[in-house]
């Protein structure tokens, strides 16, 4: 195996969230990283390589951060890499539409590194908004190379590579502007600098002195771990120092932006007009609900025909596989096990899951790419704060609509460990895409006459809102009992509205989400098919194991407004929620394999013959909404929490909630 060439230079890519930093990274390295249009989406460093002029570069995409003064996990990851990994150069990506704010980070980076290049991205959007950035003037004011980019259009990338190469091979310039921190702070810095220079750390001594004067806990803790604790002057308040440094940096950024940028006054007028509606509490929430109902309606309408066609195709392939095994003289039991057991369950999961996800995820990603999801977080932040949770949970809650496992993984964007755990534990109350088929079928059969798809979408939205309500309720209970604490604050940027990149959205939603989630579901569906087939075909006396289990669960099922067959179907549907309805059918019809019935009238007839009423359907929907997460989500929860205790709690808590709700519904239904 040939030895991998060691990169000649290590380059750090830094910038605020929503400036197109990851798009620049993709353009340079050719790697297709996921880009999200909200703050804090990336919480780890992505890495890639590229070659220019025969030189191999290693590029590190740091998390989006507003400052190198640590206030969040993202800022700490970025700061620690720039300080302690000593990259050869830093590219700071700025947004041409809001350059003044981005320059604060750029000025902080120039204090840390001698070799810096500023990449002013989104130049095409700035031009459309009438914003003009004087690149040459900005370069002269900053004393470092500045390049204009339109990374999405791949414009300016070659110039960026050339200027970066010049910076690395030339002599760094020291003629740069620095904020005026005042005479008192400058004198204190000069007292600390000689002591720090003797330690030969990879960062500038003046920068380290400023962090010590601020009483930066992370940095001072690192110094203490190196057995070089340095005490700041006692007569200098750390709050005063920090306020002075921030004010001076902001003032310098404002002065530079005022001299190099024009046309900012009217640039965001259109966005503000839209935000007056979308972020207003009177109109924003109804608009949010209408958009969600529209997505659900399109998903329900669009998924029917592809799902039927895919089901027909896959089940016909199954018959061909059966014929092939018979031609090979395979034992009858083996053929039944592989085809009637494993393959039919797998085919059902694919035909039911794939079409809705292939519609829902792209529509959802379009809202994300357009910049709407941060507005949702803004609208729901106050509600989450009252529940003792973090407003960022609104974003993970939206992700849970597609897949609860994705929602649990997305909880990494929440900085507070306590609030992150609350978000992980309550994410299961948001119905995922896999539970939609059950809701849609029961709504259509027992609560609507005919095929009123629009009304079905409204009722499905009501089910989702019940899940949101339970999320708030359990979050409040957890924050007042097991996970007490004060809600943390966070910075939420409302990015400018952007025209979604349709091609990239489709590719990203299909590859990163749809196929990823489908693959994990299929991995557990096939073994589940094996277990289901064995339970249905192994007999004790005159009854199958499946029948014995349903008889055992009947008393509990009647208390919850259901029956033993329904409860057992939920238990066996632990690998994937999509197989609950076919499992119920298999139990009712005493079949040794999954039953496929696409006709709702025939399905309704079978259910009513076995004692179903509207109350049974309601209790079944409630238990589906509030019950243990699927196996994929449970595994994800364990990976995120590294705790068997909290993983077990994530199974027990929603199941108890579901049982209580079902008991109440059953009791009230029978009384009235």
Image (spheres, rainbow, N blue to C red):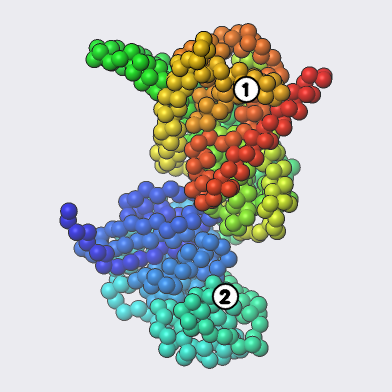
Name the disc covering residue 553, or none.
1
269 and 423: which is toward the camera: 423
For the C terminus, give its image quadrant: top right
**Residue 114 image-quadrant placement:** bottom left
Cα separation between marks 2 and 1: 59 Å
Name the disc covering residue 216, or none.
2
Q: Is residue 27 left or right of residue 187?
A: left
**Residue 243 image-quadrant placement:** bottom right
Q: Position of residue 307 (x, y in %)?
A: 46, 21
The residue sitting at the front extreme is 541
Q: Is residue 309 left or right of residue 561?
A: left
Nearer mark to the viewer, of 2 and 1: 1
494 and 612: which is toward the camera: 612
Q: Position of residue 414 (x, y in %)?
A: 58, 54
Q: Is residue 363 above or below residue 66?
A: above
Q: Residue at x 32, y 72 (%)?
A: 167
Q: Residue at x 38, y 19 (%)?
A: 337
């Amino acid at each position: 195996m040939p030895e991998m060439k060691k990169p000649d230079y290590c380059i750090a890519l830094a910038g605020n969230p929503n400036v197109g930093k990851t798009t620049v990274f993709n353009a340079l390295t050719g790697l297709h990283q996921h880009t999200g249009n909200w703050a804090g989406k990336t919480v780890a460093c992505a890495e890639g390589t590229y070659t220019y002029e025969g030189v191999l570069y290693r590029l590190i995409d740091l998390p989006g951060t507003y400052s190198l003064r640590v206030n969040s996990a993202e800022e700490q990851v970025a700061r620690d890499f720039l300080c302690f990994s000593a990259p050869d150069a830093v590219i700071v990506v700025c947004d041409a539409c809001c350059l003044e704010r981005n320059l604060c980070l750029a000025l902080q980076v120039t204090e840390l590194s001698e070799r810096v290049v500023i990449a002013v991205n989104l130049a095409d959007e700035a031009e459309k908004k009438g914003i003009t950035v004087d690149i040459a003037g900005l370069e002269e004011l900053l004393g470092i190379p500045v390049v204009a980019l339109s990374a999405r259009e791949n414009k300016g990338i070659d110039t960026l590579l050339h200027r970066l190469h010049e910076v690395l091979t030339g002599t760094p310039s020291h003629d740069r502007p620095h904020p005026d921190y005042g005479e008192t702070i400058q004198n204190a810095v000069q007292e600390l600098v000689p002591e720090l220079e003797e330690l030969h750390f990879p960062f500038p001594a003046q920068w380290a002195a400023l962090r010590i004067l601020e009483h930066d806990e992370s940095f001072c803790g690192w110094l203490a771990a190196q057995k070089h604790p340095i005490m700041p002057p006692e007569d200098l308040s750390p709050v005063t120092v920090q306020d002075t440094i921030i004010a001076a940096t902001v003032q310098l950024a404002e002065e530079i932006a005022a001299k190099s940028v024009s046309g900012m006054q009217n640039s965001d007028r259109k966005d503000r007009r839209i935000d007056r509606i979308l972020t207003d509490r009177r109109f924003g929430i109804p608009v949010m609900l209408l958009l969600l109902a529209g997505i659900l309606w399109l998903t329900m309408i669009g998924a029917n025909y592809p799902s039927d066609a895919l089901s027909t195709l896959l089940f016909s392939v199954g018959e061909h596989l059966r014929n092939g095994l018979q031609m090979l003289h395979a034992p009858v039991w083996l053929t039944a096990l592989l085809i009637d057991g494993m393959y039919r369950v797998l085919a059902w999961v694919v035909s039911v899951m794939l079409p809705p996800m292939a519609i829902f995820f792209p529509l959802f990603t379009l809202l994300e790419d357009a910049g709407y999801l941060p507005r949702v977080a803004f609208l729901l932040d106050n509600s989450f704060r009252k529940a003792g949770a973090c407003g960022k949970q609104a974003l993970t809650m939206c992700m849970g609509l597609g897949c609860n496992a994705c929602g649990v993984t997305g909880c990494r964007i929440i900085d507070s460990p306590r609030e992150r755990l609350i978000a992980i534990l309550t994410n299961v109350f948001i119905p995922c895409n896999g539970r939609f088929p059950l809701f849609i079928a029961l709504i259509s059969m027992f609560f609507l006459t005919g095929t009123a798809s629009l009304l079905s979408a409204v009722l499905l939205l009501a089910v989702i809102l019940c899940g949101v309500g339970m999320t708030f309720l359990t979050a409040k209970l957890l924050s007042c009992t097991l996970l007490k604490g004060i809600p943390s604050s966070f910075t939420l940027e409302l990015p400018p509205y952007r025209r979604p990149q349709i091609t990239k959205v489709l590719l990203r939603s299909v590859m990163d989400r749809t196929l990823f989630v489908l693959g994990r579901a299929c991995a557990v569906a096939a073994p589940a098919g094996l277990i289901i087939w064995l339970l249905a075909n192994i007999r004790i006396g005159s009854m199958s194991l499946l029948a014995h289990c349903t008889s055992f669960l009947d008393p509990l099922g009647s208390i919850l407004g259901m029956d033993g067959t329904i409860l057992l179907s939920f238990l066996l549907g632990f690998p994937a929620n999509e197989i609950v309805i076919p499992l119920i059918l298999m139990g009712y019809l005493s079949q040794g394999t999954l039953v496929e019935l696409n006709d709702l009238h025939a399905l309704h007839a079978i259910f009513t013959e076995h004692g179903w009423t509207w109350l049974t359907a309601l209790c079944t929907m409630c238990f589906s909404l509030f019950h243990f997460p699927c196996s994929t989500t449970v595994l994800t929860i364990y990976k995120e929490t590294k705790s068997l205790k909290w993983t077990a709690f994530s199974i027990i808590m929603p199941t108890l909630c579901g049982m209580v709700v079902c008991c109440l519904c059953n009791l009230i239904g029978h009384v009235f």
